[in-house]
Amino acid sequence: MANEQLKSMAVKAIDSKDRELFEIGQYLHHNPELMFEEVKAHDLLTNYLEKQGFQVDRGHVLPTAFRAVFSAGKGPKICVICEYDALPEIGHACGHNLIAEAGIATAVGIKAAMESSQSDLGQVVVYGTPAEEGGGGKITMIQKGCFDDIDLAMMVHPCTYDAGYANVIAIIMLTVTYEGKNAHASAYPWEGINALDAAVQAYVNISTLRQQCKPTWRIHGIISNGGTKPNIIPDKCVLQYQIRAPNDNEIKELKEKCINCFQSAATATGCTVDITFHHFAGDYYVPLLNNLQMVEIYEKYAKSLGVTFASLEEQKKYPTASTDMGNVSRAVPSIQPYYTIGSRGVNHTPEFNQASGSEYGHRQTIIAAKSMAMTCLDVMTDPDLLTKIKSEFHSSCN
């Protein structure tokens, strides 16, 4: 069967499951679960994939992760990724319910095309990856060898714009704890060592640093523990920070500058300071290496379905974010295109949560899934294309 017929078969299969896919997105939206607690999502997605004829390994590596496979002879192993964790208080305000829906839809479409072909097309592997929102589930899965046999990987992500190129930068998360000494704030203030003063000074130091930061650097944080009562000089205060930069060298440079800000605040106030960096299987979220050949193919099919894109140079100027999909892109050729769901608010807002549960959001998700499915089928039917994709990947890694 010709490649065009395979792609048509995939698109028809996705359309035939439209309402089922919508219900998947809706169920996840109405039942948001935090990182590493995605039990309902895990069960829903694995049960559905099993009913569709996939071989499913539940609790793969992590309790709420999974691997589902459909094979059609020898050939490449193409990985489609689902995310499904939510955010505290604002639910699916990053649209991970739609990421899961898109991954399932893509897999169903590819499977239908594989079943209609007499050729060896390889395998489609669906990974359920928990805890993107600060837990680094994919990093653990990489460390455990989940991507060792994968030829390429892809997922899509809801956003406020359409882009085949994902402007994903590195992120390091840390906790800064200052310890001082309690005292009565009115009667004996000179007996105290004020940990809140240290925290405030550190916050000001970071704000001052921003004037000399590069435009592509980001630093953001909160004081998560600022004391107990106004008349007690705080003996302990805690800050939570995230620092981001576009490449490995710059994130290390920015990290050292931030450490100086935190340590100097301790020196100025007489407090002690503990700076704890939160790693995931010994790593942090790294920048995403967009495979430009895969980006180009994805955009070609999305355009055929009515999506418009800015130039690659313009897309590289779009707002930045961070994800453990960046770490996957260091293991295998990868893309994570963005697509709009018509939200009046940006990601991580109540408005975006509302949009991720809308009919329009579903419709855009189906377009993204069809684009992924057709991209995958191009690779599965063209060994030379896969060779070129891998060649670009190895060049990028070097």
Image: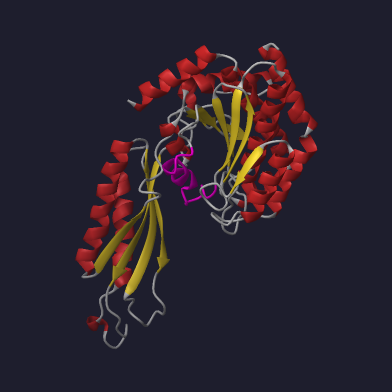
| Residue found at x 26% / y 65% | 273
Foreground pick, 39 / 93: 39
Q: Is residue 353 left or right of residue 207?
A: right
- Magenta-colored span: 130-146
State the residue at coordinates (34%, 58%).
Answer: 203
Q: Could you say which is closer to the camera, residue 163 or residue 105?
A: 105
Would you say residue 61 sits in the magenta stretch? no
Res 212 seen here: no
Choose top left, top right, bottom left or bottom right for residue 127: top right
Residue 357 is situated, as x and y percent measured from the top left of the image, at 70, 46
Q: How is the image coloured?
A: secondary structure
| The N terminus - image quarter | top right
| Residue 182 coordinates in the image, percent (x, y) | 30, 81
Quick check: is 132 in the magenta stretch? yes
Q: Position of residue 171 (x, y in %)?
A: 39, 45
Q: Residue at x 29, y 71 (%)?
A: 179
Residue 285, image x and y in percent? 41, 43
> Residue 354 vs residue 328: left or right?
right
